[in-house]
Image: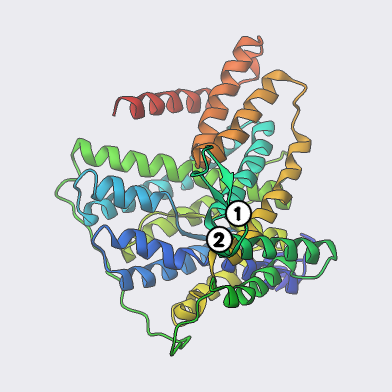
Amino acid sequence: MDKLFKLQERGTTFSREIIGGITTFLAMAYILAVNPQILSEAGLSKDALFTATALSAAIATLVMAFFANLPVALAPGLGLNAFFTYTVVMGMGCTPALALTAVLLEGILFIVLSVFGIREAIIKSIPVNLRKAVAVGIGLFITLIGLANAGIITGQAGTPVAFVNFDLEHASALVAVIGLILTIVLYTLKVPGAILLGIIITTVIGIPFGVTKVPEGFTPVSTPAAPALFNFEWGSVLTLKFFIIFFTFLFTDLFDTIGTLLGVAEQANLKDEEGNVINAKGALMSDAIGTVVGACLGTSTVTSFVESSSGVAAGARTGLASVVTALLFLVALFLGPLFGLIPSAATAPALIFVGFLMMRSVMGIDFADISEGIPAFITIIAMPFSYSISKGITFGIITYILCKVVAGKIKEIPVVTWILGIIFLFDIVFEAVK
């Protein structure tokens, strides 16, 4: 096991990897409920989607474990599934089969780009300070996700964002705060598996508050439905509408994945001597394979999950943690009702606390150099406030080029960074006129 996953080399242990893998799974297990709910509104079977979600997550995460040996889990991505349902199917009038065809072709193209190292070259083109900023921005982003999922923040108090009252009328928020306090105490006391324990205990605490709901006649075991295999439509592939769908899936998935890998690698210090993500090519290939598998099973784009940071915070450093997470997704196929008991209020404290841990990267950013500090700042604030990792990278790169040009440091801008900046500008203009 040590030789396969290099446990000693990365300063970890078998038990830490197990705890880290379980923690990552529990932090992202909500996708088993949320993805079928969103995609079923596009006319797909919710039961088949549950199976497709679990299977695609398990397969893609196993590929990540053995191809890249990284503690990064994958599953159908939020945002991408919303775009699939509300924009492509409901907004543009496309069939779910046509949308799945776009996802399939996107994944195939990503495999080709990964084989030739093009996606890896894009990662390396992102300046060092921006990579650190990506980690900080993701930290704030997942903190916001945790706050929103638990109902702690609201936009209905006369201000853009405000805290709710922590009373029994907002039981989910109250339970989440209790869970956060518990997680902080456990972590400060250096209790092994503090984040995982926090999720489990908070789930139990939620029962008397009515946040964790145990239905009558509850049984933890269920038989998974068959997925809808190879649900594709090829007749409308050579159209402008299809190209728009394909490009949007491609662009969003590419930079969400890159952002997540940079953030997790920065947090876990999984970088080589030059500061690049180790085994990046294998990681990107895993993401591409996951997307193809997911499309064949009948679900939207599979991507690397930012919640992997919670497993890293619990000690995960290798692909062994990903193996554990993948196996739990397979178990979840038969224990869907049991995992469905875990409320957002129980996973929210883990996400909020991991947000704190990821803030450490801010200390390595050179804010004294305006041409480095301003792009880093824009990257950091754009992620939570746009609710998008890819947009944070987009505006960060554009600002980086602008600041370097104005500061007379144009020679510091790599060629690939120039290319990305031009592509990002075209994308912004395209979105504005669409």
Question: Residue at position x 59%, y 77% from top?
Answer: 208
Q: In which quarter of the image is the C terminus?
A: top left
| Direction from residue 211 to residue 17 in the image, left or right | right
Residue 7 placement (x, y as % from top left) = 75, 66
Is residue 70 visible to the viewer in this orientation of the structure? no
Out of 291 and 416, give the one closest to the viewer: 291
| Direction from residue 76 to residue 124 in the image, left or right | right
Residue 154 placement (x, y as % from top left) = 52, 48
Residue 150 placement (x, y as % from top left) = 56, 58
Q: Which mark is residue 316?
A: none
Q: How crowded is mark 1: few (under 14 residues within 10 Å), some or many (20 or more)?
A: few
- When the figure is inspected, residue 44 is found, relative to residue 242, above or below; the finding is below
- When the figure is inspected, residue 142 is found, relative to residue 213, above or below; the finding is above
- When the figure is inspected, residue 284 is found, relative to residue 49, above or below; the finding is above
The residue at which mark 1 appears reads as 165
Residue 155 placement (x, y as % from top left) = 50, 43
Q: In which quarter of the image is the N terminus?
A: bottom right
The residue at which mark 2 appears reads as 170
Question: Residue at position x 62%, y 16% from top?
Answer: 403
Out of 185 and 221, give the one closest to the viewer: 185
Circles 1 and 2: CB distance less than 8 Å?
yes
Which amino acid, by three-letter code, is at mark 1? Asn
Which amino acid, by three-letter code, is at mark 2? His
Q: How crowded is mark 2: few (under 14 residues within 10 Å), some or many (20 or more)?
A: some
| Direction from residue 412 to residue 25 in the image, left or right | left
Element type at marker 2? helix
